Image (cartoon, rainbow, N blue to C red):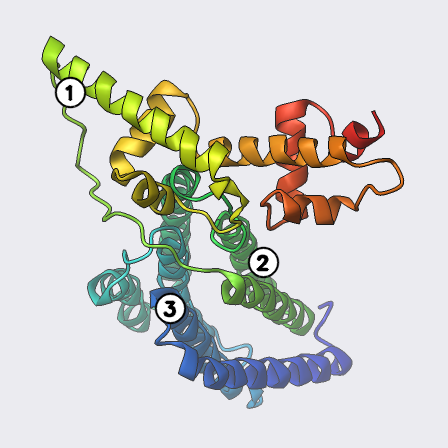
C-alpha cells in the first residue's frame, strides 16, 4: 500500500517524535500563561491533551501494533476527546466567561462513553459511531461559535472605536481550519498509511502555531453575561415617556457635539463608549441608544466617520510637497491601524485616501 514502505515509516516516526516534542514544549511554555484568562487556560488545556495523545501513540512504534484494529480503535476514541476541548476553546474566545468546569467536562464525558463501549464491542460500527458523534459535536460547536461571534462583533462595534486585537472573528477561520484537520484525521486513519499520518500531524502543528499567534495578540473584552432564553420585553411608552427620552437625547446630542467635535475626543485611538459616556455625564446605555436609534450608527461608525473627516481636513491643509504618508495621516486623525483607516475612508468617501489626496 502507498505510504507503507520503510522510508515513509521512518519519516512518520521522525515527524511523530518532533510533533510530540512540540506539544510537550508548548504545554510547558503555556503553563505560566494559563492564569491570564479563560481563553489562555483553554489553550493550555488543548496543548496538554495533544501532548498526551502523541505520547500515547508511541505504543504504535512496537512492531505489529500499527495494524492492530483494537488498539487503533481505542486510540482513536481517546483522541476524539479533543473535539469538545477544542470546541470549548473557541466558544470561550467568542463569549468570554462562558466556559467553566461543567461545560468542559460534560461534553468530554459524553464523548468518553465511546471508549468503554468500543472496548466491550470492538467493531467498525462502534468505531464509526464515535467518529460520527465527534463530528456532530464539531458541527454544533461551529454553528454556536458563528452565532456567538455575531454577538461579540456587535458588542465591539457598539462599544469601541477600534477592532484591532479585540475582534475575535479570526476564531471562525481557525475553527473551520481545525474542522478540515479533523476530516483529514479520519481519512488518514481510514487509509492507515505512514505518509498520511505524518502529513496530518504536520498540518496540526502549523494550524496550532497560527492559532497561538492569534491568541497571544488577542485582548479579551468583557461581554455582558449570555442569557440564551432572555427575550426583550416590548413596553408601550406613554407620551410623557417619549418626551423624557426626546429631552434626554437633546442633552446627549449637545454634549456629544461639544466633546467630540469641540474637544476632538475621537483623536484618542483607544476611545471607548464608556470614555465618552463618562465625559458627557450619561451612561453607556443611553448613549448607545442615541447613536443607534437617532443617528442610526454604531459607536465604531460614528467615531471613525469623525476621524475620516479629520483626515480630509489634514490632507486639504497640506500642499502636495508637504503631504505626509497615509500612515502618518491615519495616526494624526486618531486611527491606530492603516487598514481600518483605508476601510473607513473608502466607506465614507467612496474612494481610497490616496485617491482623495491626488484629487
Residue in the image at 23% along x and 67% along y: 101
The residue wearing badge 2 is 184
Q: Give the numbered dot on residue 42.
A: 3
Left or right of residue 217: residue 139: left
Could you tell me how many numbered marks the image carries?
A: 3
Check disc 2: other Cα within 10 Å, few if <14, some if 14-19, many if 20+: some
**SS state under label 1:** loop
Q: Give the numbered dot on residue 223.
A: none
**SS state under label 3:** helix
Asked if marks 2 and 1 touch (Cβ < 8 Å), the reply is no
Q: Nearer the viewer, residue 65 or 340?
A: 340
Q: Nearer the viewer, residue 93 or 127?
A: 93
Residue in the image at 62% along x and 66% along y: 200
Q: Nearer the viewer, residue 271 or 87?
A: 271
Q: What is the quadrant of the C terminus in the image?
A: top right
Q: Position of residue 184 (x, y in %)?
A: 58, 58
Badge 2 or badge 1: first in the primary sequence: 2
**SS state under label 2:** helix
The residue wearing badge 1 is 234
- State whether residue 70 is above or below residue 124: below
Check disc 3: other Cα within 10 Å, few if <14, some if 14-19, many if 20+: many
Task: State the separation of the CA atoms marked 2 and 1.
Answer: 49 Å
Task: State the separation of the CA atoms marked 2 and 3.
Answer: 23 Å
Q: Nearer the viewer, mark 3 or mark 1?
A: 1
Residue in the image at 26% along x and 47% along y: 224
Tell me where residue 61 sits by quadrant: bottom right
Check disc 1: other Cα within 10 Å, few if <14, some if 14-19, many if 20+: few
Q: Position of residue 263 (x, y in %)?
A: 47, 39
Badge 3 or badge 1: first in the primary sequence: 3
Amino acid at each position: 500500500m502507498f505510504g507503507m514502505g520503510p522510508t515513509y515509516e521512518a519519516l512518520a516516526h521522525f515527524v511523530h517524535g518532533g510533533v510530540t516534542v512540540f506539544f510537550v514544549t508548548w504545554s510547558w511554555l503555556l503553563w505560566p500563561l494559563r492564569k491570564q484568562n479563560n481563553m489562555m487556560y483553554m489553550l493550555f488545556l488543548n496543548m496538554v491533551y495533544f501532548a498526551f495523545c502523541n505520547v500515547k501513540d508511541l505504543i504504535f512504534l512496537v512492531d505489529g501494533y500499527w495494524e492492530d484494529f483494537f488498539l487503533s480503535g481505542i486510540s482513536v476514541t481517546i483522541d476524539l476527546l479533543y473535539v469538545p476541548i477544542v470546541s470549548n476553546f473557541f466558544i470561550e474566545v467568542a463569549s468570554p466567561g462562558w466556559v467553566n468546569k461543567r461545560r468542559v467536562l460534560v461534553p468530554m464525558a459524553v464523548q468518553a462513553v465511546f471508549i468503554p463501549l468500543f472496548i466491550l464491542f470492538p467493531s467498525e460500527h462502534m468505531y464509526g459511531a464515535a467518529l460520527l458523534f465527534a463530528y456532530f459535536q464539531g458541527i454544533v460547536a461551529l454553528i454556536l461559535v458563528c452565532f456567538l461571534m455575531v454577538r461579540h462583533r456587535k458588542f465591539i462595534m457598539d462599544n469601541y472605536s477600534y477592532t484591532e486585537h479585540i475582534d475575535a472573528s479570526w476564531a471562525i477561520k481557525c475553527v473551520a481550519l481545525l474542522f478540515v484537520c479533523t476530516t483529514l484525521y479520519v481519512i488518514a486513519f481510514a487509509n492507515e498509511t505512514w505518509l498520511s499520518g505524518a502529513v496530518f500531524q504536520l498540518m496540526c502543528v502549523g494550524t496550532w502555531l497560527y492559532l497561538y499567534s492569534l491568541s497571544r495578540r488577542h485582548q479579551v473584552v468583557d461581554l455582558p453575561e449570555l442569557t440564551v432564553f432572555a427575550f426583550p420585553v416590548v413596553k408601550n411608552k406613554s407620551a410623557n415617556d417619549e418626551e423624557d427620552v426626546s429631552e434626554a437625547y437633546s442633552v446627549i446630542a449637545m454634549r456629544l457635539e461639544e466633546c467630540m467635535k469641540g474637544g476632538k475626543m475621537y483623536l484618542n485611538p483607544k476611545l471607548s463608549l464608556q470614555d465618552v459616556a463618562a465625559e458627557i455625564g450619561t451612561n453607556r446605555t443611553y448613549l448607545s441608544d442615541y447613536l443607534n436609534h437617532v443617528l442610526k450608527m454604531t459607536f465604531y461608525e460614528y467615531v471613525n466617520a469623525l476621524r475620516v473627516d479629520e483626515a480630509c481636513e489634514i490632507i486639504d491643509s497640506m500642499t502636495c510637497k508637504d503631504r505626509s504618508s497615509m500612515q502618518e495621516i491615519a495616526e494624526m486623525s486618531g486611527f491606530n491601524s492603516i487598514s481600518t483607516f483605508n476601510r473607513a475612508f473608502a466607506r465614507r468617501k467612496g474612494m481610497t485616501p490616496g485617491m482623495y489626496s491626488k484629487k
